[in-house]
Image: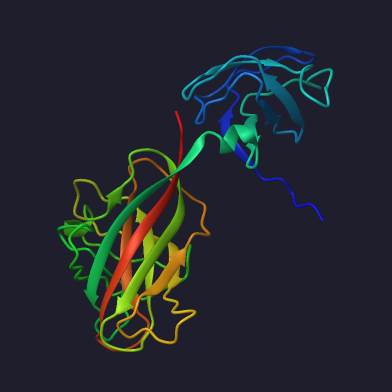
Amino acid sequence: MSSLVQYKEISRVSSAVAAGALGGIININALTIPLKSGDDIWIRTPRGESIRFQITGDAPIGTTAIRVDISASYPGITSTLSGIPVNSAVMLPDVSTALLARTSYQYQTFTGSISAGTSQNWISGGQYGVTYHTWNRDSGDTGITVGSSTMTILKQYQHAGIRVPYDCTLIGFSGAGRNNNGNRQFAGGLFVGTPDWGATGSITPTLRAYAAANFSPGTAYTNRPVKVEDLTRSFEISAGDVIYPAIKSLSGTNDTIQLTFNLVLKTIKA
């Protein structure tokens, strides 16, 4: 059984196109992914029509006008029906060669060591951030639901994360850790939010990736390497937002826990 193709929006039409046009220039908002001559795109109108075009000239990131030929695109629609209105979505299939060939994975590795306490709270890097291995900022929060659980960060610690310079997609993390004290499980998570820049407010970034430790195919956690991995996410992060990694115990024992994260982001090739 075939699955539905998912589409990724890469721009919006900024000037209407008259009915019956077979090619020419379509004005759009600045592209977020580069296109090459010969690529096929879909334009989906607010009326629910989907029209397939072929790009006839290279269009780098930031391009605001694309040259197209509708007759060169299989199955070959002979007109643009009743025209293309402003704000129609410019789309690529998520599985298209054009999209896959122009994305890449980026990685960042860091290690945190915590004294877990007895409350199962999330603990993250203090004033020196994630690259200083002793993490000691207790958030007071325990939630483990991706997409809704949050972690409170006071103003003096909001700098202590990973600020992303460009729009990207969070895939998750691949990690390895150990419980230094006993046969008890622990977990890692990635929270994403926007600092209260230059102000005094607290923020509550949201959990966007989560994994509990897994000792399989072994038999225990005690002072042994275990896997901690969540590579199942596809969360869009805006340029300037900050990723806050954190570690927590899943028991009520004050264990010493170390976890090495390998952060995974998907970015667009220029």
Depth check: give the residue in front, 146 or 209. Answer: 209
Judged left or right of residue 168, residue 126 is: left
Residue 196 as seen in the image, left or right of residue 87? left
Task: Locate residue 83, reporting x and y percent.
Answer: 75, 20
The picture places residue 152, in percent across and down from the top left corner, at: 29, 65
What colouring does the structure picture have?
A: rainbow
Image coordinates for residue 53, horizontal then vertical, percent = 71, 23
Q: In this view, does 147 lie above or below 106?
A: below
Q: Residue at x 37, y 83 (%)?
A: 221
Q: In this view, does 238 lie above or below 129?
A: above
Q: Is residue 205 visible?
A: no
Residue 156 locus on image (x, y percent): 16, 58
Residue 217 in sight here: yes
Q: In which quarter of the image is residue 255?
A: bottom left
Q: In this view, does 217 lie to the left or right of 22?
A: left
Question: Quarter-wise, where is residue 227 in the image?
Answer: bottom left
Q: Which residue is drawn at 44% across and 62% down?
A: 209
Location of the C terminus by quadrant is top left
Residue lying at 26% horizontally and 54% vertically, measured from the top left? 161
Labels in figure, total = 0
Whether 107 is drawn above or below 142: the answer is above
- Residue 228 picture quarter: bottom left
Quarter holding the N terminus?
Answer: bottom right
Q: Which residue is farthest front?
A: 218
